[in-house]
Image (tube, grey):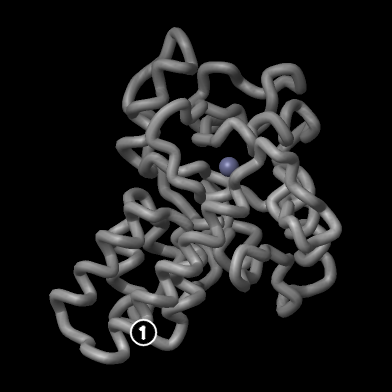
Amino acid sequence: MRPVDKGDAPKQYSDYKKARNDLAGRIGWYCSYCEMPVKNMIEVEHVVPIKNGGAELDWENFLLSCKYCNTLKSDRNTSRNGYFWSDKDNTFLAFTYQSAIIKANGQLNSSQVRIAQSTIDLMGLDRYPGGSNKPTNADTRWISRHESWSVANTSLADWNSSPSESMRRQIGRTASGTGHFSIWMEVFKNEPEVRKELISSFTGICRNCFNAEGNPIPRPNGDL
Ligand SMILES: [Zn+2]
């Protein structure tokens, strides 16, 4: 889950749905949870559900979501507590990515692993045909992850055969179009120059969540 920086509220909203384009301008047209690129029908999502007392019109309570994550999350969380959130934590540290499979990062402490797993469970982020939590027929998120993993690995092979500044920029453009920042960062984990390109290519990445080498660091004031 890529960490994002929404910035301050651009204005007051009379209808939360009207915040969609402002949000997408700040954090890109990606689901804030599964990282799938969503160019149409992306939804303004209330982090704390309105039904559970979440502010309906407060920018601080907004993220963007695909319909799968939004439907699964529904109003099941009563607060932000007990989960990691892409606008408050360095959520890149919360999970591991291998092909289309997302797991809680086993290098975290036991309490953090539980929170990471709760976050996965809330949005069903680990749904995968070969896993214990299988996707519904309509849920295409794993296919999107799988495609990004495949394109990222092909791009890595190209980079290894002819690394250049233009190749690096091309990888940044391809990645931001394909989505799934975290998958690209995993595939290019040994290539700091490309990692830095990825961080600058995706709209709205939390810059304080990565050091000068493009490696993740704890987010100021975050739980991760
Ligand atoms: Zn999603």
Q: Name the quarter where the N terminus is drawn.
A: bottom right
**SS for dot 1:** helix
What amino acid type should be assigned to the residue bearing mark 1?
Ala
Q: Residue at x 42, y 79 (%)?
A: 188
Q: Is mark 1 within 8 Å of ligand 1?
A: no
Q: Residue at x 40, y 16 (%)?
A: 18
Q: Residue furthest top?
A: 14
**Res. 22 image quadrant:** top left
| Residue 221 seen in the figure | no
In the depicted structure, whether residue 54 falls above or below residue 119: above
**Res. 106 image quadrant:** bottom right
Residue 44, percent from left and from top: 51, 26
In the depicted structure, whether residue 65 falls above or below residue 185: above
In the depicted structure, whether residue 195 falls above or below residue 112: below
| Residue 74 seen in the figure | yes
Residue 181, percent from left and from top: 44, 61
Residue 30, percent from left and from top: 44, 43
Residue carrying label 1: 157
Q: Residue at x 31, y 36 (%)?
A: 25
Residue 211, percent from left and from top: 40, 76
Q: Name the quarter where the C terminus is drawn.
A: bottom right
Crowding near pointer 1: few (<14 within 10 Å), some, many (20+)? few
